[in-house]
Image (spheres, rainbow, N blue to C red):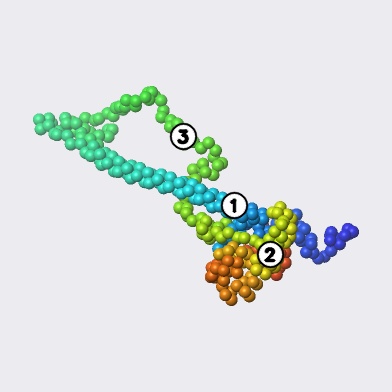
């Protein structure tokens, strides 16, 4: 028996610690891990760069972005949509040309078949001054077989006739299999896209709508609202704000803002206030306390915040990785 209880191998019970340890070592089974505070971004950080925002903007769904990062993302997505649309139109044009070629080939085959049938019909005029036995058999009549009596009373003898060799073919040479076309040869048979069963991937028509990277909803540049955070200390520069745990406060009540504090953005002024201030003060008059503009429900944007490490924050902090399970 070993010294430590958690490494004991003589116990009759398969403990939770041993099961978790064996699962991590074997690579099988579903693993669960709880995210700590270090794995959650702050409420004032960009959802793309995960860094504190210098020029923040917010979407109608409450996701905060750096203006430069989200504009670069929108332009990149538009270029990607244009590239996909160009590839789709190119494939569509190739398919149209292929359909035209197939229709033209079908029409040519129909004409060729008609001409072949016409050429097989041969009518030869009969000479009334020649006896019937002397006339040559028509192309439709079968020649007499070996040993049959001819119309003159004698027996026919079959003499094999040698056909002239085809153009470019040496007499006496056997017709072997045609040589393989080098253009149709597979350079790498193990590549799935080059196998005989492989087919061209059919491209679907891409959507021209630019979507939000977080919510997946349509997003336009005009939907972005500038956000103005109220600093706790105006004398501290931006580098000093990064090192502080509490950087911003509510624009009305001066309460400190953090991931544990639900916040909202007022669209007319862009000020960030707490939801408690919105429920107790702003919703009574529906007036922006910063610039005095009239507010609507659409003008109050609830800011998406990160987790705090506690289960009561309302943010899912459980990460799960599903893997195959070995069963006896």
**Disc marking residue 183:** 3
Q: Nearer the viewer, mark 3 or mark 2?
A: 2
State the residue in front, 56 or 211: 56
| Marking on residue 69 | 1
Between the residue at mark 3 and the residue at mark 1, the CA separation in whole angstroms equals 47 Å
**Res 137 quadrant in image:** top left
Dot in front, 3 or 1? 1
Q: Position of residue 204 (x, y in %)?
A: 46, 52
**First in sequence: mark 3 vs mark 2:** 3
Q: Nearer the viewer, residue 191 or 282?
A: 282
Task: Please provide percent x and percent y for residue 275.
Answer: 64, 70
Side (left or right) of 130 relative to 19 = left
Quick one: label 3 or label 1, which is nearer the N terminus? 1
Corner quadrant of residue 291 = bottom right
Which residue is tagged 2? 249
Residue shown at the point (17%, 34%) measured from the top left: 124
Question: Up-down: is 257 above or below 87?
Answer: below
Q: Residues within 10 Å of mark 2 (few under 14, many from 20)?
A: many
Vertically, is 191 above or below 290? above
> Which residue corresponds to the image point at 79% horizontal and 62% vertical from the top-left?
17
27 sits to left or right of 82? right
Quarter of the image with the N terminus in it: bottom right
In the shown orientation, is residue 187 left or right of residue 272?
Answer: left
Asked if residue 29 can be seen in this view, the reply is: no
């Amino acid at each position: 028996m070993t010294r430590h209880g958690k490494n004991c191998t003589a116990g009759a019970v398969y403990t939770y610690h041993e099961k978790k340890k064996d699962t991590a070592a074997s690579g099988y089974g579903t693993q669960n891990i709880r995210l700590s505070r270090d794995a959650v971004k702050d409420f004032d950080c960009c959802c793309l760069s995960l860094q504190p925002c210098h020029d923040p903007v917010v979407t109608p769904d409450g996701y905060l972005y750096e203006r430069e990062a989200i504009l670069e993302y929108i332009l990149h997505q538009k270029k990607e949509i244009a590239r996909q649309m160009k590839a789709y139109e190119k494939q569509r044009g190739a398919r149209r040309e292929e359909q035209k070629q197939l229709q033209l080939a079908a029409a040519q085959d129909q004409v060729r078949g008609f001409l072949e049938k016409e050429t097989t019909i041969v009518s030869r005029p009969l000479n009334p001054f020649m006896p019937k036995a002397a006339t040559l058999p028509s192309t439709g009549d079968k020649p007499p077989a070996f040993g049959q009596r001819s119309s003159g009373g004698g027996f026919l003898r079959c003499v094999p006739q040698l056909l002239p060799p085809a153009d470019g073919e040496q007499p006496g040479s056997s017709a072997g299999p045609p040589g393989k076309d080098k253009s149709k040869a597979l350079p790498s048979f193990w590549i799935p896209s080059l196998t005989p069963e492989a087919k061209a991937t059919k491209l679907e028509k891409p959507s021209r709508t630019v979507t939000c990277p977080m919510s997946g909803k349509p997003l336009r540049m005009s939907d972005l609202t500038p956000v103005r955070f109220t600093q706790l200390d105006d004398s501290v520069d931006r580098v000093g704000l990064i090192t502080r745990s509490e950087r911003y406060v509510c624009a009305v009540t001066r309460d400190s803002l953090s991931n544990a504090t639900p916040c909202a953005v007022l669209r007319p002024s862009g000020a960030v206030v707490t939801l408690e201030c919105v429920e107790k003060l702003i919703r009574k008059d529906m007036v922006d306390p910063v610039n005095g503009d009239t507010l609507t429900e659409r003008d109050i944007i609830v800011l998406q915040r990160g987790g705090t490490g506690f289960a009561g924050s309302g943010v899912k902090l459980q990460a799960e990785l599903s893997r195959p399970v070995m069963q006896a």
